[in-house]
Image (cartoon, grey):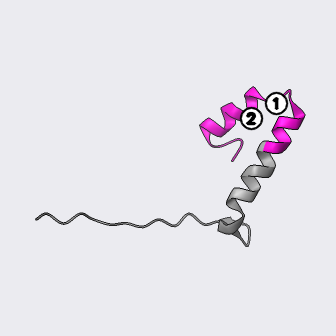
Amino acid sequence: MERSVGPTQKLVESIATEAEKLAVLRAEFAAMVAPYYSENILRQDYLLTRAQAR
């Protein structure tokens, strides 16, 4: 996602010279997506709801 998602790409580019910050970012991102990642697939489920008019 570092190469394909614009905001993430810009963030990585801005801290590319700071290896420690980049390592922390990557570790935090991996921890954040771990529950949604299995079998080399990142699952992005969502809940679709509609408001009911009264």
**Mark 2 in CB contact with mark 1 (< 8 angstroms):** yes
Looking at the image, is 8 positioned above or below residue 34? above
Say left or right for 48 vs 54.
right
Q: Which residue is mark 1?
A: 16
- Residue drawn at point x = 73 percent, y = 67 percent: 40
In the image, 15 versus 41, the foreground residue is 15
Disc 2 crowd rating (10 Å Cα; few below 14, some 14-19, many 20+) is some
Residue at image position (56%, 63%) is: 44
Element carrying mark 2: helix
Tell me what residue is drawn at x 68 percent, y 59 percent: 33
Q: CA distance from mark 2 to mark 1?
A: 6 Å
| Residue located beneath label 2 in the image | 12
The numbered dot on residue 33 is none
At mark 1, the secondary structure is: loop
Left or right of residue 20, residue 31 in this image: left
Indicate whether residue 5 is drawn in magenta. Answer: yes
Q: Residue at x 47, y 65 (%)?
A: 46
Seen in the picture, residue 38 relative to 26 is either above or below; the reply is below
Which residues are drawn in magenta?
A: 1-24
- Outermost residue toward the right in this view: 19
Quadrant in the picture for residue 53: bottom left
Residue 12's quadrant in the figure?
top right
Assign the magenta stretch its main secondary structure. helix
Residue 27 horizontal/vertical position (percent): 81, 51
